[in-house]
Image: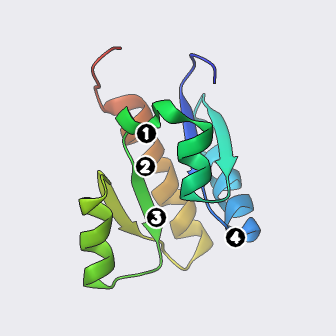
Amino acid sequence: MSESPYILLVDDNPDDVDLTILALKRSDLNCEIVVVRDGIGALRQHPLTKSQPVVILTSSREEHDIAERYANGAKSSIRKPLDYNNFTADVKHLGLYWMVWNERPIG
């Protein structure tokens, strides 16, 4: 993992991975995108992610799912828009917030 900003994308659906990567690239964020297929893979391959903010994009609105995400350390849970243009806009805003506007402790 390089020292430059990165986004660890965890998704088991290849089509969603492709759409998310396309949306991130269109956002002009200067960051590396690392893809793993499941949460276990993310934890095994990137042990330092424990201190990283976790943002969940999901289609589920179930209250118990939302509660479980936050209980497991998510910093944000956002419902995916079904429209691609809205999805792209949302990803751009999320990227700007977490990669540019948000101030995190160094180290």
Report whether 66 appears left or right of 47.
Answer: left
Amino acid type, residue under disc 3 in the picture: Leu
Label 1, label 3: how far apart the Cα atoms are: 15 Å
Q: Nearer the viewer, mark 3 or mark 4?
A: 4
Q: Position of residue 59 (x, y in %)?
A: 47, 79
Q: Which element type, helix, strand or loop, lies under badge 2?
A: helix
Q: Earlier in the sequence, mark 3 or mark 4?
A: 4
Q: Which callout, 4 or 1, points at the residue further toward the start of the chain? A: 4
| Amino acid at circle 1 | Leu
Q: Residues within 10 Å of mark 3 (few under 14, many from 20)?
A: some
| Residue 51 image point, x, y percent | 36, 33
Check contact, mark 4 vs mark 2: CB within 8 A: no
* Dots 1, 2 in contact, CB < 8 A: yes
Quadrant for residue 45, please give it.
top right
Q: Residue drawn at (57%, 77%), measured in percent from left and top? A: 83
Any mark on residue 13, and which? 4
- Amino acid residing under circle 2: His
Q: Amino acid at mark 4?
A: Asn
Query: Which of 11/101 is in front?
Result: 11
Pointer 4 and pointer 1: residues touching (CB < 8 Å)?
A: no
Q: Which mark is residue 93?
A: 2
Say which residue label 1 marks. Answer: 96
Query: Where in the figure is residue 44, as x and y percent of width and height?
Result: 58, 43
Residue 91 drawn above or below residue 47: below
- Residue 27 lies in what quarter of the image? top right
Q: Which tag is nearer the camera, tag 4 or tag 1?
A: 4
The circle drawn on residue 57 is 3
Relative to the observer, which residue lies in front, 57 or 107? 107
Q: Nearer the viewer, mark 3 or mark 2?
A: 3
| Mark 1 residue crowding within 10 angstroms, few (<14) / some (14–19) / many (20+) | some
